[in-house]
Image (tube, helix red, strand yellow):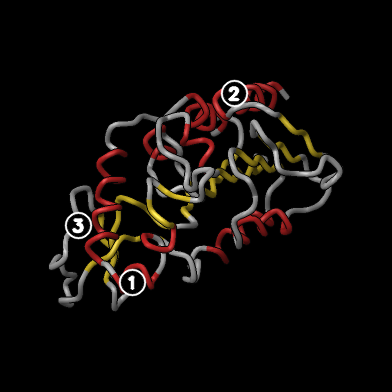
Amino acid sequence: MKKIVVLTGAGISAESGISTFRDADGLWEGHDIMEVASPIGWHNNKALVLDFYNKRRIQLFTVLPNEAHKALVDLEQHYQVSIITQNVDDLHERAGSKNVLHLHGELLKVRSVKNSKLIYNWNTDLNIGDLCEEKSQLRPHIVWFGEEVPMLEKAIEITSKADILMIIGTSMQVYPAANLINFIATEIPVYFIDPKPAIQKNYFPNLTVISEKASTGVTKVVTKLIDL
């Protein structure tokens, strides 16, 4: 069974009602990114950071997977599908995808500030005073700016074995995630799905660009791949 690797970004979740990471004015839900998504932001104002992610977590329970998420599940009946997502939501999993790797962490998990291996499922508010089993404060299980991406090596390993690559709803401007495309075999088919695709058509010899939103573009590509 051929292996399809799918790289997804904010665009696939936006259609479900989740705000994209950065608005046109450079803010995220009215906050400077570094205030809520960096170690120094956490150091300066833990209460603000916790409140920010508590609100994102609450919002997550109000949205549902869209047609793009569901189409990727259908693909699993015909291919070995691995999804590598920059998103911190659980919409891929809720749709039914079985192999999802979160590069930038997960909103429904928290971890110890002193022992990054102590990770817990979490679906309520996280507050100052919520401690791990070693009595250290818990923080969002999110990869912030300036932090290492612990799942990167695993993502590179998965990407390097792809027979087909799909890129959905991402600007390919966020590093190191954007570097993953450099680890595929150059001759494999690549499908880039985004209303404003930020990729050169001659970047890959077998590149197909679909300038559509995820829900329609992904459905078209999945139908094509299933019919092959």
Disc nearer the start of the sequence (3/1): 1
Placement of the N terminus among the 4 image quadrants: top right
Q: Which residue is mark 3?
A: 126
Disc nearer the start of the sequence (2/3): 3
- Give the residue at x 46% y 57%: 104
What whole-number distance in Å separates the C-alpha atoms at marks 3 and 1? 18 Å
185 to the left or right of 174: right
Q: Which mark is residue 219?
A: 2
Task: Using a 10 Å C-alpha cutoff, classify the residue at mark 3 as few (fewer than 14 neighbours), some (14 to 19) or many (20 or more).
Answer: many
Q: Estimate the x, y position of residue 111 in percent, counting from the top left.
A: 29, 66
Placement of the C terminus among the 4 image quadrants: top right
Dot 3 lies on which element?
loop
Task: Using a 10 Å C-alpha cutoff, classify the residue at mark 1 as few (fewer than 14 neighbours), some (14 to 19) or many (20 or more).
Answer: few
Q: Estimate the x, y position of residue 27 in percent, counting from the top left.
A: 45, 50
What whole-number distance in Å separates the C-alpha atoms at marks 2 and 3? 37 Å
Query: Amino acid under label 3?
Result: Leu
**In contact (CB < 8 Å): disc 3 and disc 1:** no
Relative to the observer, which residue lies in front, 59 or 193?
59
Query: Amino acid under label 1?
Result: Lys
Disc nearer the start of the sequence (2/1): 1
- Give the residue at x 71% y 29%: 210
- Give the residue at x 29% y 73%: 113
Q: Estimate the x, y position of residue 75 in percent, counting from the top left.
A: 57, 30
Dot 1 lies on which element?
loop
Query: Amino acid under label 2?
Result: Thr
- Give the residue at x 23% y 67%: 138
What whole-number distance in Å separates the C-alpha atoms at marks 2 and 1? 37 Å
The answer to whether residue 10 is above or below residue 102 is above
